[in-house]
Amino acid sequence: MIETLIAVAILMISIAGPLTIAQKGLMASVYARDQVTASFLAQDAMEYVKNRRDYNTKYGVETGWLTGFDQCIDDPCVVDTLAGEIENSSGPVSEILYRGPDGYTTDETAGPASQFSRRFFLISNEANDREYRAISEVSWNNGTVSNEVRLENQMFNVNR
């Protein structure tokens, strides 16, 4: 009987180790998946804003190269790349992204809420009105742990 108990204990210890390693590996892969998704969402917003700035510059929008970004200067905005909208986050638009059939959007009717929130803002350079620091942030929670991906880029008015 003692030999059987010892054999069972050895078997349990030999099984518990690999299961713990598998659990840690699964948790790491879930975190990596979420981090890659957040990075893509942050890059998506940054590319949308840069594209809109380039459009303003190329087609000579009368009000300037920052047309559409006025509410984002030194104040967070919500960027919805599917709808083509940039709105101040203090308004009715939520920073939470919803998973729709075509991708992530701020439209609540598109699908279920995701764990991701996205914000975008421009920081003005007081010494140079041709240059702004663009920041795209995506945050999410894994249980009780908060995570964030933050991209920063410089935007310039190339017409001046």
Image: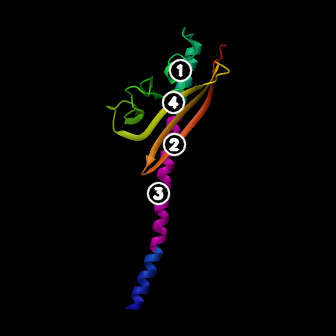
Disc 1 element? helix
- The residue where tag 1 is placed is 52
Q: Indicate the amino acid at tag 1.
A: Arg
Q: Residues in magenta?
A: 15-42
Disc number placed over residue 120 in the picture, else none: 4
Q: Indicate the amino acid at tag 4.
A: Phe
Q: Give the mark nearest the N terminus, 4 or 3.
A: 3
Disc number placed over residue 148 in the picture, else none: 2
Q: Is residue 35 above or below residue 97?
A: below
Instruction: Report if the CB atoms under discs 2 and 3 are less than 8 Å apart.
Output: no
- The residue where tag 3 is placed is 26
Kindly report the distance in space between the C-alpha atoms of the residues bearing marks 2 and 1: 25 Å
Q: Disc 2 or disc 1, which is closer to the eye?
A: 2
Q: Is 131 one of the magenta-colored residues?
A: no
The residue at 54%/26% (across/down) is 74
**Quadrant in which the N terminus is drawn:** bottom left
Q: Position of residue 61 (x, y in %)?
A: 54, 10
Q: Disc 4 or disc 3, which is closer to the eye?
A: 4
Kindly report the distance in space between the C-alpha atoms of the residues bearing marks 4 and 3: 31 Å
